[in-house]
Amino acid sequence: MFKVLAESGSARTGELTLNHGVVETPVFMPCGTYGSVKALTPQQLQDVGTRILLGNAFHLMLRPGAETVQELGGLHAFMHWNRPILTDSGGFQVFSLRDNTNVDDTGVTFKSPINGDRIRMNPAISMRVQAALNSDIVMAFDECTSHPATHREAQASMERSMHWAAESKTNYVGNGTLFGIVQGSLYDDLRTQSLTKLEEIGFAGLAIGGLSVGEELEAMDAVLEALLPQMPRNKPRYLMGVGTPTDLVKGVCLGIDMFDCVMPTRNARNGHLFTWDGVIRIRNAKFKTDDAPLDEQCSCYTCQNFSRAYLHHLDRCHEMLGCTLMSIHNLRFYHDLMGSLRERIATNALAAYAADLLARFADANRIGLRS
């Protein structure tokens, strides 16, 4: 299912074989929460280099309903996407909708963000939903621990997640690949306990959850530096909900294989564009008459055909085409970044290249958000 192909320090390239294709790692996964990456067609996603994307079991359960998607051929057929899909379990919504949730040891009761109805989610329901969606990678149901949390609060949350992880493994009846999620907030001892328990249960892949939820960047880095050397070499490692180009470069250097974040597409819709020389904020007046492409080094459809002035104009007029063109660029940039990192790992030339990238990206804001 997963094999390491090359290593450079702690970083590695690999192949992840899934039901709908082989994914080269390290890889970035765009967020298609509702079965759609905003402003882009599936064909455009393929054209920019997307190999795998993320959907959300909780939101798809609410609309249109997992049974509806199943009757229509599963999520791949429903959204006309023939490459792999990872589905989040709904555990992050325990955090993001925390003001309208009630958590107990058997699951979570949500207040629907659509109509206020009471919605129940637990490991059995999450596994049933993800099986109906026919996800390639299925995430165990967990509780994404809020920040800040005391050691006692984080331990209780982590232990609940580990109980739910075992129930997820027992209840999943499908042909996808099941990942467990390491929790434990910012506490190294809890992270180690969580990892040990997940290995006892037995998962094909391991994710790191509960980060990029409000903690300082240095705190996240410290957790990863302590945890990653303990994680098994022969399993894919997925850092959930992260992040900026800087986060991706640092994560790859530490040994992360998979990332997801709404940032490239959300920021694109807000005129915040990533280039090899840092960030362009296209709404700035100085771009009104700038006839240069967004990035001279980029071969995406947007950069090959349109000027900064035209994108500035579309954004100022709130034209939907602007969201599409800028999303195409940002996702192509992310995929090209991951491809360049894979190439440097394979040639054992990562260290100097990563240092150069981090210097270039120093001005990028860190806003890692999980959908």
Image (cartoon, rainbow, N blue to C red):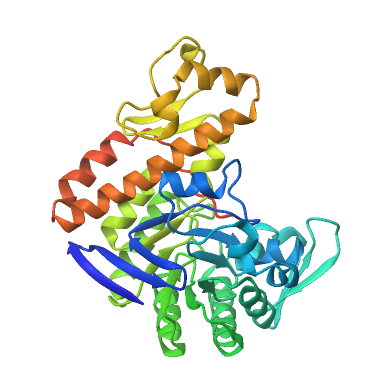
Residue 93 visible at all: yes
Answer with left or right where residue 59 lies relative to residue 303.
right
Residue 63 versus residue 350: which sits nearer the camera? 63
Residue 187 in picture, x, y percent from top left: 44, 69
Q: Residue furthest left?
A: 348
Residue 82 in picture, x, y percent from top left: 51, 61
Q: Is residue 371 above or below residue 223?
A: above
Residue beneath the point at 45% across and 30% down = 302
Instruction: Give the quadrant of the N terminus.
Output: bottom left
Residue 142 in picture, x, y percent from top left: 58, 73
**Which of the 4 quarters of the picture holds residue 158?**
bottom right
Residue 365 visible at all: no
Residue 195 versus residue 312: which sits nearer the camera? 312
Answer with left or right where residue 366 lies relative to residue 99.
left
Residue beneath the point at 33% across and 56% down = 251
Answer with left or right where residue 77 lies relative to residue 112.
left
